[in-house]
Image (cartoon, rainbow, N blue to C red):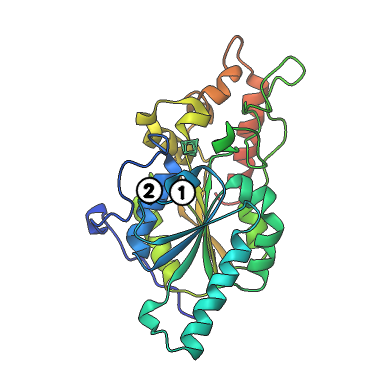
């Protein structure tokens, strides 16, 4: 097994000043998923082929225009893992039998939202990870089907309002289901590397991508994609919302490698979850017209139970 490298970056100024995504894409201003990908690209460089499952970030590259320096292949929501396998095989055959130099090898990187990852593409992703496909998977998780108007996905938080789970008299919480734990689903496959990242923590994110870049096999990322449009906050506040997700303990920053889960940033003193909830319209029904302490307490209970395992 390739050794997992340690910390590579200590300061933001050590990150590459090069930009691999040109400005002016049609994505929403303040999109946390795009910011996460932008920082990851500084580590991955340009020898990358992106395999994009239909979703918000599909709008990045609309034929014949692309703001990316790497190549971009668009697939259905269910097919990025299968497409990645085909590309990986083609590269390996060309390098093995047809003299393609190693310097022209490409990292195959899936870019997919939580709807594709946790829902429509879950079984194909599971099979690809299980058979050890050599690829990177970047899931930008905004907790909803964002590019079709923000419908519920299996990643939508309990207590959030979406287009298909509004808060109504019969269902005051909005979404009443607890989200799938994608980290644990993926961890059960024992991938070579797995991590959660947030664009608000660029050093943590960059070091995790540097580790993944040096490895072979399934390397999987869940990126906290603070989403001004779907979550209902001002795009200038993306960093504030993303920071509160980590400081309230709602979004743990962690990695899994060689059989161990390590938290890469422990919130020193966790803030109450409502500090995060009150920043977004999707949770507005928890505070007005009357405060729903019962639902807020349920969200706090889940976060506390998680951290009790580690603190
Ligand atoms: S809807 Fe949200 S995730 Fe999708 S592009 Fe807009 S801000 Fe990004």
Question: Residue lying furthest right in this view?
Answer: 170
Residue in the picture at 67% in, 42% down: 154
Residue, disc 1 = 266
The one nearer the camera, 128 or 5, is: 128
Determine if residue 268 is in view. Answer: no
Judging depth in this view, the residue of 132 and 157 nearest the camera is 132
Element marked by disc 2: loop
**In the rendered structure, are the residues bearing label 1 and label 2 in contact, judged by CB atoms less than 8 Å apart?**
no
User: x, y (%) of residue 65?
Assistant: 38, 50
Judge whether 61 appears above or below 275 on screen.
below
- Looking at the image, how many numbered discs can be counted on the residues? 2
At label 2, counting other C-alpha atoms closer than 10 Å, the crowd grade (few under 14, some 14-19, many 20 or more) is some
Residue 75 sits in quarter: bottom right
Q: Secondary structure at mark 1?
A: loop
Ligand 1 within 8 angstroms of badge 1 C-beta? no
| Residue 251 in the figure: left or right of residue 115 | left
Task: Determine if the C-beta at disc 2 is less than 8 A from ligand 1.
Answer: no
Q: Which mark is residue 208?
A: none
Q: Which mark is residue 201?
A: 2
Q: Quadrant of residue 194?
A: bottom right
Is residue 276 shown above or below 140?
A: above
Q: Give coordinates of residue 121: x percent, y percent.
A: 66, 54
Q: CA distance from mark 1 to mark 2?
A: 13 Å
Q: What is the quadrant of residue 187 in the picture?
A: bottom right
Q: Provide residue 114's location: percent of width, then percent of height.
A: 59, 46
Q: For the point 58% across and 12% down, which residue is it?
A: 288
| Residue 261 appears in the rendering | yes
The residue lying at 52 percent from left, 41 percent from top is 249
Quick one: label 1 or label 2, which is nearer the N terminus? 2
- Label 1: how many Cα within 10 Å (few below 14, some 14–19, many 20+): some
Report the residue at 48% width, 42% height from top: 225
């Amino acid at each position: 097994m390739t050794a997992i490298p340690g910390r590579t970056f200590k300061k933001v100024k050590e990150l590459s000043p090069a930009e691999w995504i040109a400005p002016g894409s049609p994505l929403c201003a303040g999109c946390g998923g795009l910011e996460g990908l932008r920082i990851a690209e500084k580590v991955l460089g340009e020898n990358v082929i992106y395999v994009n499952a239909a979703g918000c970030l599909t709008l990045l590259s609309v034929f014949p225009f692309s703001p990316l320096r790497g190549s971009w292949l668009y697939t259905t929501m269910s097919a990025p893992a299968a497409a990645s396998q085909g590309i990986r095989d083609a590269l390996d055959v060309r390098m093995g039998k047809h003299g393609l130099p190693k310097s022209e090898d490409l990292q195959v990187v899936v870019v997919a939202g939580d709807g594709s990852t946790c829902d429509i593409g879950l079984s194909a992703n599971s099979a690809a990870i299980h058979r050890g496909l050599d690829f990177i998977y970047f899931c930008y998780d905004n907790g909803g089907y964002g590019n079709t108007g923000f419908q519920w996905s299996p990643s939508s938080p309990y207590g959030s309002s979406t287009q298909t789970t509004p808060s109504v008299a019969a269902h005051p919480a909005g979404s009443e289901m607890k989200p799938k734990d994608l980290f644990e689903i993926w961890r059960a496959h024992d991938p070579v590397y797995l991590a959660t990242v947030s664009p608000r923590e660029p050093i943590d994110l960059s070091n995790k991508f540097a580790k993944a870049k040096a490895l072979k096999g399934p390397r999987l990322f869940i990126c906290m994609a603070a989403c001004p449009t779907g979550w209902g906050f001002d795009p200038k506040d993306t960093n504030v919302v993303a920071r509160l997700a980590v400081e309230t303990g709602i979004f743990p920053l962690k990695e899994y490698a060689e059989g161990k889960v390590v938290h890469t940033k422990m919130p020193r003193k966790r803030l109450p979850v409502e500090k995060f909830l009150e920043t977004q319209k999707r949770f507005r029904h928890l505070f007005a017209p009357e405060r729903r302490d019962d639902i807020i307490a349920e969200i706090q209970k889940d976060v506390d139970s998680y951290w009790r395992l580690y603190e």
